[in-house]
Amino acid sequence: MRRATRVLLAGIAAMLLAAAPASAAPTLTVIGNCEYAGGKFAASLSGFVPGQKLLVDVMATADPDAGTPLATSELTANAAGELSALLDVPPSQDTKRVARAVRVRGVGLQATLADARLFTAARGVSFAPSASRGTAGKVERWSVTGLPDGTRLWAHFRRAGKTVRTVKVGQAADPCGRLRFALRTLPKDRERRGRWDLWLTSKRTYRQPKTGVYVHRRMSVTGRGSKARVSFRPLQSRLIASDPRAIAPETTLVRAYATQLGVIRTLFLGDAGGAKVDFFERIDDRLRKLGSVRGTPGEVTTLENATMWSCTRRTRRFVAITTLPDGTPGSGSDTIQTPSCATRFRVSAPAKVSPGKTFSVRVVDRWGNGGISPKLCVTPPSKSRSCRTLKFRSAVTVVSRRFRASKRGSWRLELRIGSSRVRAKVGVGKGAAKVRALPRVIVTGDSMMLGVDSFLTDELAGDADVRPDVRPGGGLTRPGNDWTTIAAEQTAKTKPTYTAIMIGAVDGFPMTTPGGAKIDCCEEPWIAEYTRRVRAMMATYLRKGRAKVFWATLPLPKTAARQTISMAVNTAIARAAAGVKGVSLVRFDLLFTPKGYTDSIRYRGRNVLVREVDGVHLNVEGTAIAAKVLAKLIRDEL
């Protein structure tokens, strides 16, 4: 990797981890959204007296001052008043997520110095009705808790050593790895007497699992048909991933970026001290190794081109593992969403062709990956559709086909890949229809827009030509980032009709005014200068009234120091947008944090976890919601 790239990545990590001023107040951070009884969780403490002996208590409820501790660990702060530790998760009998408090006290003192929330659950399998006997046609309600996030389960019904039927039952998407589904006791129209086995595994094709996730139930059947009597033996289950590293406690921030078309880059943001970092993709309960990198001490460890985007597997989960300089394990994970194939291909053909002439249809794989076979369908006027497969070899990005314009009128072209469609038209002869030019949308900002850009591209597919240009770590106040120039370059290149932007996650640096005065965050002079910079960018994106801007405020972050910065940024954005024609203020702070920071929001009748474990960024579900809001606003203007 070139030194300039290393320096840039190191700067991004530094901004993400330390953009906010240090606070003197003691703080406690628990990493992870749900931990399982009998496992371990990571806790990070800072702001304590160097060498101070501390007690870390795990309480029975979410109230840090109620009851007696379930578990207590004695730790000692280092010379910087900081420490990180892996602590035991206390026993729990409930498969529902339980909120507990983790608190820090000084040895011999009762006062709580800092506290945080810990969610725990017990792994387990249940079903209703729960009885030792039943009938073959009974539909049971199953609940499995403790699956690795994203794990898919298949039900394999087996009799006499053969698989009678396989049913996909769902995918775990709950923070505690919960999956609920309904399942018939035996497959319909296949009820037969004898011994049956039901296996729930993470593989589509049955193979008796020696490792990894499984649930097994043995049944004895008497009679035939839906009323056949069935007796059940006790369930046997294992809900641990095939590779235990897939569920190791998270101790370090890991990030995956899909900002370059077609490829994913993974970063280990902690200081590995030059040790080797192993990068994996987690698929269900297994790890697929992507590569290893031995980084430079003090810099971010990055695996460039870790893997490619996929049309069929869009939610991607990544894990990075190393041994930290102090000998302790360092691990982390990240989940991202890549675009669908709706915008992967570009189909180009001439708008008009003379009758009898031949014309070329050019299909471009914008991702640049190749190794895929979409289908191109052509429908001439008053004739049936004909389709042919286009084979893109690996790394081949352009395929063209020629057609003879044998009939006047409008020829319809359609490229198919899965459920995605890309359409175009060719007019042959007089009065042929013209292809409508789509309005262009720039999606830009810092790392807060990662994921939003992918979802927004899908949301507006067919309605707008979306051009993502997200720049992680690029705040308005970070030295070396001139967003006024960046905005001018973006508009000159793209000439957008609309711009959607969210920025400011790493801001908080001192600024210099045009008059030469240096001002620190986050009082009124700093807000005024930030307002001036935002307003200048808005003017650029508006293109003298020919375009519109949708500027989103920041959801409040978790820590108090970062909240001060984000509130100052949001105040400046609101002031800059006030009274400016063509600028719409999108209040993501009110959508995601209406009453202060929270991990989840109420959305469409259910509680949805929307934040990453770093307490700053939106997770996959959060970015999807943000994109839906922006897409509706833009679509209303089309």
Image (spheres, grey):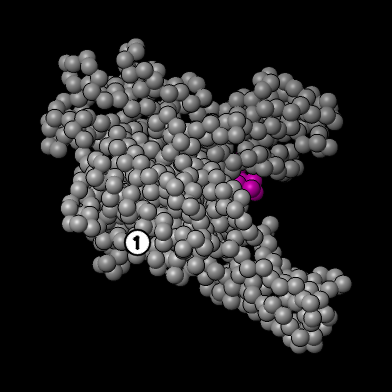
Q: Residue at x 26, y 41 (%)?
A: 524
Question: Residue 499: x, y in percent?
Answer: 49, 57
Snapshot quadrant of residue 560: top left
Q: Is residue 448 left or right of residue 380?
A: left
Is the residue 322 above or below the residue 608 in the image? below
Report the front residue among 377 and 207: 377
Question: Residue 93: x, y in percent?
Answer: 48, 20
Please state which amino acid type lies under the numbered disc 1.
Thr
Instruction: Examine the structure image and report whether residue 204 is included in the region drawn in magenta.
Output: yes
Is the residue 444 above or below the residue 220 in the image? below
Q: Residue at x 70, y 42 (%)?
A: 167
Question: Residue 369: x, y in percent?
Answer: 53, 69
Q: Which residues are magenta?
A: 201-208
Q: Please name the predominant secondary structure of the magenta segment in the image.
A: loop
Report the front residue among 373 and 157: 373
Disc 1 crowd, CA 10 A, few/some/many (<14, 14-19, 20+): some
* Position of the N terminus by quadrant: bottom left
Residue on which disc 1 sits: 484
Instruction: Examine the structure image and report whether residue 24 is included in the region drawn in magenta.
Output: no
